[in-house]
Image (spheres, rainbow, N blue to C red):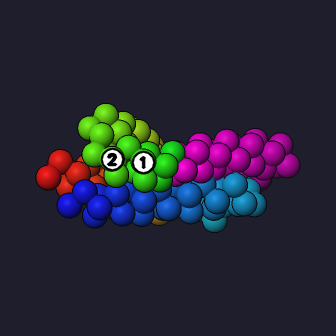
């Protein structure tokens, strides 16, 4: 089960890398942000701020994705409990907060946001942690 857990954590890491890449390369405002902002004029200053936020968030997702893969391939593969727990805490903290924030925006705006991606990656990470215990 341990090797399956390592693979699952690596899939989560790849998902985080994909999210990071998407935000790092996105041209502001992203489609769903543009839809939310459709009732107002989007200024160059707003695009500048959104672009900076995208880059910051994208960089954080890239770092978390790389860290998840590295810890999975080293500490989890070596069956170190603290490595498993570290991945659980990292991915569930980011996943919960990202899911909650994006879902809140969707509820308030009635515009579909990508909260489901964060929720799925969080559940998959939890599953990877549980498998690593057996």
The residue at 35%/39% (across/down) is: 83
Disc 2 secondary structure class: loop
Question: Main SS type for the magenta part?
Answer: helix
At a point 50% along the width and 62% down the height, the residue shown is: 14
Q: Position of residue 5 (x, y in %)?
A: 29, 58
Please indicate whether residue 69 sits to the left or right of residue 41 in the image.
Answer: left
Q: Which residue is mark 1?
A: 74
Callout 2 crowding tier (Cα within 10 Å): few <14, some 14–19, many ≥20: some
Task: Report the residue that reaches farthest toward the right.
Answer: 44
78 vs 81, nearest the viewer: 78
Q: Quadrant of the N terminus?
A: bottom left
Relative placement, left or right, of 58 versus 129 is right
State the image coordinates of residue 53 (x, y, percent, origin top left): 68, 43
**Element under disc 1:** helix
* Viewer-proximal residue among 87 and 42: 87
Query: Which mark, by number, is residue 78?
Result: 2
Picture quadrant where residue 96 is located: top left
Q: Is residue 9 magenta?
A: no
Q: Are marks 2 and 1 in contact (CB under 8 Å)?
A: yes
Left or right of residue 79: residue 115: right
Along the line of sight, the residue nearer the viewer: 8 or 44: 8
Spot occupied by residue 113 in the image (x, y as percentages of width and height): 48, 59
| Residue depicted at x 65% and y 56% | 23
Q: Residue furthest left?
A: 134
Residue count near mark 1 (Cα–Cα under 10 Å), binned few <14, some 14–19, many ≥20 = few
- Residue 61 highlighted magenta (yes or no): yes
Q: Residue at 33% across / 47% down in the picture?
A: 78
Q: Which residues are magenta?
A: 38-66
63 up-or-down from 106: above or below: above
Q: Residue furthest front?
A: 78
Q: Is residue 87 above or below residue 11?
A: above
């Amino acid at each position: 089960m341990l090797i399956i857990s390592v693979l699952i954590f690596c899939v989560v890491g790849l998902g985080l890398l994909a999210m990071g890449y998407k935000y790092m390369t996105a041209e502001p405002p992203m489609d769903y942000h543009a839809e939310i902002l459709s009732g107002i004029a989007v200024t160059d200053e707003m695009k500048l701020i959104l672009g900076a936020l995208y880059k910051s968030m994208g960089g954080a997702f890239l770092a978390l994705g790389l860290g998840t893969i590295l810890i999975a391939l080293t500490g989890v593969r070596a069956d170190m409990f603290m490595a498993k727990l570290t991945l659980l805490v990292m991915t569930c903290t980011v996943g919960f907060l990202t899911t909650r924030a994006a879902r809140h925006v969707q509820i308030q705006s009635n515009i579909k946001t990508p909260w489901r991606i964060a929720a799925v990656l969080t559940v998959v990470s939890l599953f990877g942690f549980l498998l690593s215990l057996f």
